[in-house]
């Protein structure tokens, strides 16, 4: 009888731990998606402070992408990425009424790193500097710094229509 009771306690304890892990994973997933959506909206809203707060600030961060009108894009380090985005937003300060649709989200999370892939669908708003019309295949790599997720890599392939 003791063995059965002990087995039941271990099974119940394992189930509770599994649900606790699930809840923690779901909270991390929600935090990651909120960061990605917030960074995307800061881009379209031309909110540099929010954009800046979404990113890690180091020489190792990257943006890499491709689009038919511009070919390959590579930006290295926060100094280049941040300065370029700040200037880009200042040159075209009016927000763009764009809320891209995101589908096919795939997330992998570890203790302090996560990667996310998704399909993003944007509209043609007439802004050459900010538009990403049609289908864009997106990748994000994030690091957890001081308990907060930060973007360290953005990859995009603008497939278009």
Image (spheres, helix red, strand yellow):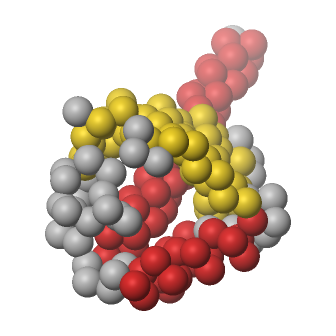
The percent coordinates of residue 96 (x first, y second) are: 23, 72
The percent coordinates of residue 14 (x first, y second) are: 64, 28
The C terminus lies in which quarter of the figure?
top left
136 in relation to 85, above or below:
above
Residue occupying image coordinates x 69% and y 17%:
7
Q: Does residue 110 appear in the picture of this structure?
A: yes
- Residue placed most toward the observer, 112 or 36: 36
7 in relation to 106, above or below:
above
Q: Does residue 34 appear in the picture of this structure?
A: no
Residue occupying image coordinates x 62% and y 80%:
83
- Residue placed most toward the observer, 153 or 13: 153
- Count of numbered badges drawn on the protein: 0
Q: Residue furthest right?
A: 59
Residue occupying image coordinates x 70% and y 41%:
110
Which corner quadrant of the image does residue 69 belong to?
A: top left
Residue occupying image coordinates x 33% and y 51%:
132
The percent coordinates of residue 71 (x first, y second) are: 51, 42
Q: Is 17 displayed left or right of 26 in the figure? A: right
82 in relation to 107, above or below:
below
- Residue placed most toward the observer, 111 or 45: 45
Q: Is 132 displayed left or right of 64 in the figure? A: left
The N terminus lies in which quarter of the figure?
top right
Which corner quadrant of the image does residue 58 belong to?
A: bottom right
- Residue placed most toward the observer, 117 or 69: 69
The percent coordinates of residue 121 (x first, y second) are: 26, 42
Which corner quadrant of the image does residue 9 belong to?
A: top right
């Amino acid at each position: 009888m003791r063995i059965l009771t002990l087995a039941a306690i271990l099974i119940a304890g394992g189930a509770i731990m599994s649900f606790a892990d699930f809840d923690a994973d779901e909270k991390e997933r929600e935090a990651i998606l909120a960061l990605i959506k917030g960074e995307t909206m800061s881009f379209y809203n031309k909110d540099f402070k929010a954009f800046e707060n979404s990113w890690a600030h180091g020489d190792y961060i990257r943006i890499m992408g491709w689009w038919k009108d511009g070919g390959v894009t590579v930006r290295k380090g926060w100094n280049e990425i941040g300065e370029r985005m700040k200037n880009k937003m200042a040159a075209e300060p009016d927000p763009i009424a764009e809320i891209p649709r995101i589908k096919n989200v795939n997330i992998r999370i570890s203790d302090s790193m996560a990667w996310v892939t998704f399909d993003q669908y944007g509209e043609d708003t007439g802004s050459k500097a900010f538009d990403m019309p049609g289908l864009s295949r997106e990748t994000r790599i994030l690091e957890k710094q001081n308990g907060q997720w930060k973007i360290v890599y953005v990859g995009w392939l603008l497939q278009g229509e």
